[in-house]
Image: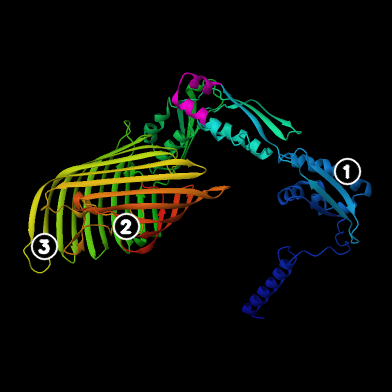
């Protein structure tokens, strides 16, 4: 036999043995066969039927010993006497289960029923009676929170009021054990998330009056002391110095150890782009709550990283990107980022060199960008160079930079070439309950720029080009507000205003002008499609105004992260406030408040274009 033939024979024998072995596994060929000589499984010794309202029937069938033993292995070994004892105990067990749902006067009967079939039938009949409701609630708070509220501290008063308002079992509500447990757990979770890390119950009681079907609740929460962050220890640093994060971390020192404040600092440390994870733990057992030690555990990202991506953006269509990051350029405390993105509508190349945090909390940056943007019968080619500094704190972000920008705009009406040298300042103030998916609070954003521009406009058709130069000022502001409206409704609103102050004959770079329309602007219209027209061609406007109102509500009571929404957007860009004519868009949406931020799918009707448009959005734009 040749070597090749022997190899084929060995292969076939191996496959045959493998197939035979697989046939013996329980996930091949259906259920495993019984071992030779073993008897087949014995049939159940009884059948159980529960006659009760559907919700209570489900509860009983899930938790009654009789129901669970009906199909349990080894039930055939139960003696008639043991089954009789289970039947005798079933009524009492059922009444105990019904009491967890607030039925304290339930009548339960269990009897054997002869229907002529085997195995014999056991029938449980349930008359639940009236459901108990909360008659009186006594809710008290002791400890540090009480002391702070007594001194008139606004935050303590608001927290104490929120604890009372959010307590689920209010007078008149039906009593259930699950709601009772959940309400108590929620109070402790709320206290601990607001800095009272040692919160516990001084006492809780639910007094049941079975004859009146009422329950009186007594709860006394001991908040303990308000914990404030003391010394912060850092663990996990390998390549980077502590100064890379300490300027941000020490903002917590002396502050209340609230979950929101800690999460905000963690998020801003991650936003530095140096770490894969950042977790801050404050010691809840500290004997000195006013100076509780904290541990910042870090895990560094790789020094160099390349990322290839393919995706879709509602405003700019399909796109592919290649990104490279060096988090310690030549071993220094500088990060270099470069990104090439090619898309249907927009293609860009970005480069940025930014320092790690300095001791004063600022970072120095140098940046540049090349961009090609097409759409609305125009092509814009632009670039800029920037140098400046940036700083983020818990509430405020600041950025200032000098910029040289150049843009060329090709339209059916002609070509505009312009350049500008400017000084810029951006300021943002955040006061929201959750940066990723806010439901309460507001965000204010202001931008200002001043500089000198020069531009050349060349009309189509051989007309002489016009040139001009001169100073300009650009101002922009945006405010967003979020507020719960009651009964699970959430409201949000946005107002956006901008203006470029410039001589009418001076063409500043199109990147400094305004347009509206798109997912985060006026829904129902294409990206950047709302703008003034010059000789029938859309161009950037010197003034901008947009506004939005939206209400949303959870689709499912037990899944509040999934919401449906209705909204109205309005706005436009124009050459002057006198020529401003708002375009309206309104529609409905499905939103998911995911762990990384909201995902939005909106269907909007644009009144000016009389058409429906589908919009996709991810995250919150501040």
Q: Which residue is mark 3?
A: 458
Left or right: 503, with 76 as reference point: left
Give the label on residue 291, or none: none
State whether the magenta stretch is mostly helix, strand or loop.
helix
Residue 534 x/y as whole percent: 17, 61
Span of residues in magenta: 143-161
Q: Which residue is mark 1?
A: 88
Q: Colour scheme used in the picture?
A: rainbow
Q: Which numbered disc, 2 or 1, marks the residue closer to the eye?
A: 1
The quadrant holding residue 88 is top right
Residue 176 x/y as whole percent: 68, 39
Separation of residues labelled 2 and 1 (CA atoms): 75 Å
Left or right: 622, with 37 as reference point: left
Q: Is residue 398 above or below residue 554?
A: above
Q: Which residue is mark 2?
A: 340
Outermost residue to the bottom:
1
The quadrant holding residue 396 is top left
Q: In this view of the protein, which residue sits in the foreground, 540 or 17?
A: 540
Residues at discs 3 and 2 in contact (Cβ within 8 Å): no
Rendered-image quadrant of the N terminus: bottom right
Indicate yes or no whether the magenta region holds residue 147. yes
Q: Is residue 622 in view?
A: no
């Amino acid at each position: 036999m040749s070597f090749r033939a022997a190899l084929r024979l060995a292969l076939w024998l191996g496959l045959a043995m493998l197939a035979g072995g697989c046939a013996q596994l329980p996930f091949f060929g259906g259920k495993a066969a019984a071992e030779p000589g073993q008897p087949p499984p014995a049939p159940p010794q009884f059948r159980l039927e529960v006659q009760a309202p559907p919700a209570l029937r489900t509860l009983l069938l899930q938790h009654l010993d009789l129901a669970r033993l009906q199909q349990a292995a080894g039930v055939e070994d139960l003696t008639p006497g043991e089954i009789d004892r289970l039947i005798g105990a079933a009524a009492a067990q059922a009444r105990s289960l019904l009491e967890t749902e607030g039925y304290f006067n339930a009548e339960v009967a269990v009897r054997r029923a002869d229907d002529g079939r085997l195995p014999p039938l056991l029938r449980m009949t349930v008359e639940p009676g009236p459901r108990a409701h909360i008659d009186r609630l006594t809710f008290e708070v002791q400890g540090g929170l009480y002391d702070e509220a007594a001194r008139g501290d606004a935050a303590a008063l608001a927290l104490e009021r929120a604890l009372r308002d959010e307590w689920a079992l209010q007078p008149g509500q039906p009593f259930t054990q699950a709601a009772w447990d959940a309400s108590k757990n929620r109070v402790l979770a709320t206290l601990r998330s607001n800095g009272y890390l040692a919160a516990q119950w001084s006492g809780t009681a639910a007094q049941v009056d079975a004859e009146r079907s009422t329950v009186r609740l007594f709860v006394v929460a001991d908040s303990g002391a308000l914990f404030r962050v003391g010394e912060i220890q850092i663990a996990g640093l390998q390549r980077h110095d502590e100064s890379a994060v300490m300027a941000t971390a020490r903002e917590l020192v002396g502050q209340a150890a609230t979950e929101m404040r800690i999460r905000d600092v963690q998020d801003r440390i991650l936003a530095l782009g140096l770490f894969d994870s950042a977790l801050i733990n404050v010691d809840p057992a500290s004997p000195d709550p006013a100076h509780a030690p904290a541990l910042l555990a870090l895990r560094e990202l790789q020094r160099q990283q390349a990322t290839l991506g393919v995706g879709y953006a509602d405003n700019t269509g399909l796109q592919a990107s290649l990104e490279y990051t060096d988090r310690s350029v030549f071993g220094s405390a500088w990060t270099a980022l470069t990104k090439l993105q090619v898309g249907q509508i927009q293609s860009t190349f970005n480069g940025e060199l930014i320092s790690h945090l300095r001791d004063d909390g600022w970072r120095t940056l140098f940046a540049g960008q090349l961009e090609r943007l097409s759409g609305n019968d125009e092509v814009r080619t632009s670039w800029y160079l920037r140098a400046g500094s940036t700083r983020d704190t818990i509430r405020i972000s600041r950025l200032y930079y000098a910029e040289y920008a150049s843009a060329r705009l090709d339209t059916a009406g002609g070509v505009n070439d312009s350049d500008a040298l400017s000084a810029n300042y951006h300021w943002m103030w955040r006061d929201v309950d959750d940066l990723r998916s806010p439901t309460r609070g507001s965000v204010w954003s202001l931008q200002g720029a001043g500089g000198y521009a020069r531009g050349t406009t060349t009309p189509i058709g051989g007309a002489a080009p016009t040139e001009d130069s001169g100073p300009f000022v650009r101002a922009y502001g945006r405010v967003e507000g979020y507020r719960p409206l009651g009964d699970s409704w959430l409201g949000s609103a946005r107002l956006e205003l901008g203006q470029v102050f410039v001589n009418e004959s001076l063409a500043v770079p199109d990147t400094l002008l305004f347009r509206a329309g798109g997912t985060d602007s006026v829904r129902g219209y294409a990206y950047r499609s709302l703008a003034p027209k010059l000789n029938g061609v859309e161009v950037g406007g010197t003034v901008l105004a947009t506004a939005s109102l939206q209400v949303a509500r959870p689709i499912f009571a037990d899944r509040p992260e999934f919401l449906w929404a209705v909204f109205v957007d309005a706005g436009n860009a124009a050459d002057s406030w006198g020529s401003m004519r708002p375009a309206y868009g309104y529609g409905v949406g499905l939103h998911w408040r995911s762990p990384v931020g909201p995902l939005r799918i909106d269907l909007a009707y644009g009144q000016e274009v009389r058409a429906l448009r589908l919009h996709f959005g991810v995250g919150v734009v501040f």
